[in-house]
Amino acid sequence: MAGSRREWQGGYVRRDARGRDVYVIRRMVRGCRYDVSTRCNSARAALEQLARFEADPEAYDPRGARVDDPIFLDEQLARGFLEWSRTVRNNTRKWVGEQRSALAWWAERLAGQNLRRVSLPQIVIPALDGTLDAPKKTKGRAHKIATLKALYGWLRKHRHLLTSAEDPTVDFAVPQATPAQRTKHKEYTPEQIAAVVRELDPDRRRARLAAERNVELDQVRHMTDYRDHVQLAASTGWHVTELHRFATAGRVLEPTALQSQDGTEAVLETIHKNGEVFRTRVGPTGAAAARRIRATAGFSVERYAEAVCEAARVAGVAGFRGALRHSALTWATELEGEEAAQKLARHKSGRTTKKYYAERAAPPNPLGRLRLV
């Protein structure tokens, strides 16, 4: 064995001859000791292999099916992918539903096709060309490409059934946002957000609903309080999906002495969309909201969106949907600069932060108070 070991929740990690981490499952199940390599070099992939092992330890094989077996996009394969998307990746019900529709579309066009032999120029692109008949369908094209790439990535990285050479989507880019989308106003002022938060008060929501239905207040069901979720979104710049993952399984950590010096009240730990654990510092307001959210353990993204949209309508804040990433990163850019905003967003390139999230930021001008005579 090359290198020293360290532990992970499924067993231990060793180093191979090339210096890469290799995750090994070590478990005692019904009196039988298992010590089997997942053949994975990342924690995310190893956790998925661990879930497969725990489902059936005796039949577990990290290779999955034989590598020379054909793979078809049938109902069983689609169901397995969607279950992984929902439970392992923690994607929203809305996105999983869109993936299901896209998979059904692909299943018709790839019927009888061995996914190992699918050609990008001869099969995939001609199938997609029909989605460009009208401008409205450009978004549908992007979803179809994203779903196919996710499916192939799942087969390659998590099921270990394909090699990179057999994946036609490796270098196939998902269409990006148009310039008009990037310049669309998506930032809100703290005052606008506060107005929406006020209207999210459960008692105010119940009173409005009772008035709309012309019934007594006690006849209206209890309303979930989403004020903390909006506050936390504004404090962290998280996507709503990251907010959901934190509410479901995140952690609130106490800051170190050094972290406390900049006003950090708590360090929030959650799972990024790429499967990696990351931490975000928050002040007193964000920390209090995070603790209350974790005490309730989870929330519905769809109902959150409905509640926020209704509160925004009453508050007169047009277009507000509860996702405050653009706002938070614009504020961070103005207060601390683009590099700080990039770190908060977890972007590898600062150009991504500026291009998509903080394009309307205007950092303070030190000459603004200078009088010229």
Image: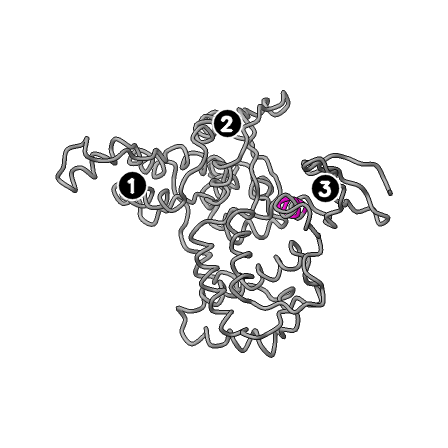
Q: Residue at x 52, y 52 (%)?
A: 83
Q: Is residue 331 above or below residue 77?
A: above
**Location of residue 6 by image quarter:** top right
Report the residue that reaches farthest toward the left. Answer: 214
Pointer 1 local density, CA inside 10 Å: few below 14, some 14–19, many at least 20:
many
Mark-to-mark CA distance, 2 and 3: 39 Å
Q: Residue at x 52, y 30 (%)?
A: 282
Q: Amino acid at mark 2?
A: Gly
Q: Amino acid at mark 3?
A: Ile
The disc, 1 or 3, on the residue closer to the chain's N-terminal end is 3
On the image, the x and y values in percent for residue 343 come to 60, 41
Q: Residue at x 49, y 37 (%)?
A: 248
Q: Which residues are magenta?
A: 46-51
Q: Is residue 47 magenta?
A: yes
**Location of residue 66 by image quarter:** bottom right
Mark-to-mark CA distance, 1 and 3: 49 Å
Q: Which residue is mark 3?
A: 25
Q: How many marks?
A: 3
**Predominant SS along the magenta part:** helix
Q: Amino acid at mark 1?
A: Ala
Q: Which residue is mark 2?
A: 283
Which element is circle 3 on? strand
In the drawing, does residue 136 fall left or right of residue 223? right
The disc, 1 or 2, on the residue closer to the chain's N-terminal end is 2
Question: Disc 1 or disc 2, which is closer to the eye?
Answer: 1
Q: Can I make out residue 364 in this image? A: no
On the image, the x and y values in percent for residue 14 come to 80, 41
Q: Which residue is mark 1?
A: 311
